[in-house]
Image: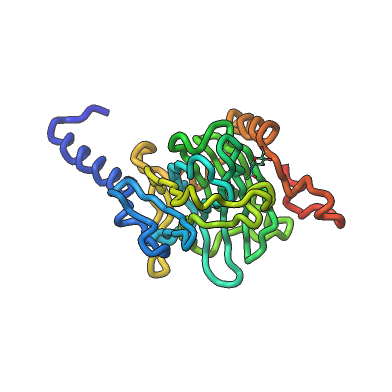
Amino acid sequence: MAFSSTSTLPIFILVIIFLGTTTANFYNEFDITWGDGRGKVLNADQLTLSLDQSSGSGFESRNEYLFGQIDMQLKLVPGNSAGTVTAYYLSSKGSNWDEIDFEFLGNLSGDPYILHTNVFSQGKGNREQQFYLWFDPTSDFHTYSILWNPQRIIFSVDGTPIREFKNAESMGVPFPKNQPMRIHSSLWNADDWATRGGLVKTDWSKAPFTASYRNFKADACVVASGKSSCGGSASSGGNQAWLSEELDNTKQERLRWVQNNYMIYNYCADSKRFPQGFPPQCKMA
Ligand SMILES: *[C@@H]1O[C@H](CO)[C@@H](O)[C@H](O)[C@H]1NC(C)=O
């Protein structure tokens, strides 16, 4: 289709409007919820959380989401981060809550972080998978993504899927699909269990510990006053392909590569924990 000179301007304006709906502004999108000044929005596109011996800190999104493709770049606590946990997750409220978790367990300098993941539906979790990363997550920003649509939840790191949790309602497993969730993050101390199962304690002489966030992007359905409105990215022409997206062959191969080489714990392979048999969703391909 050819554009006449008179149609160019409206199209230009339309593109700006699409960008405006998907470009992050930390001031508009998030509230620092605790930590007494230890969490800081540095500018429209950068936020930091910190932790010292008296407190950690945290933030949450103003929006509530019901499905989305949600990307955030994080740079984790560098150096000796043993005993620290940086949690980045989606969660609804109430006793039957849904939750989709990334948790980064710190370590001694040079020793690997563990990326811990979990999915809760109707208040029930116990679906942990843990990974090492194929890079140092403290030396630069990397993108951690959650694709959440009615069929599946896909956790990705720099575009590489590391975990897929499929909708297994047909097997009687509740799937998060009715409760809007907020994005949350917090940096806190868990040296009773986080590093080598609690053997390595936090070295408070290295405090404050700081994690950084930037480039938040959400193509998502935002729920407000009981109504849901779904957005699409400018790069995808405003479409909502993510609402039905699944892993193509290339991505499935990447997923297998991560699971074969970097996965260090999988609840679906922990037969000691499930002597009566694995949960039904473990039987899904
Ligand atoms: C920390 O490093 C040790 C030794 O390499 C490793 O066993 C452990 O999995 C690492 N991560 C955490 C969070 O404990």
Residue at 65%, 44% in the rendered image: 130
Position of the C terminus by quadrant: top right
Describe residue 253's horizontal placement relative to residue 69 as left or right. right
Q: Position of residue 216 (x, y in %)?
A: 39, 46
Q: In the image as oriented, which residue stretches furthest toward the bottom?
A: 95
Q: In the image as oriented, which residue stretches furthest toward the right?
A: 276
Q: Position of residue 236 (x, y in %)?
A: 39, 38
Residue at 34%, 40% in the rendered image: 234
- Quadrant of residue 34 within the rendered picture: bottom left
Position of the N terminus by quadrant: top left
Residue at 45%, 47% in the rendered image: 70
Q: In the image as oriented, which residue stretches furthest toward the left?
A: 6
Looking at the image, residue 164 lies above or below residue 54: above
Residue at 43%, 55% in the rendered image: 221
Looking at the image, residue 259 lies above or below residue 223: above
Q: Position of residue 64 (x, y in %)?
A: 43, 61
Q: Position of residue 144 (x, y in %)?
A: 49, 42
74 or 84: nearer the eye? Answer: 84
- Quadrant of residue 223 within the rendered picture: bottom left
Q: Quadrant of ligand 1?
A: top right
Asked whether residue 51 appears in the rendered view, the answer is yes
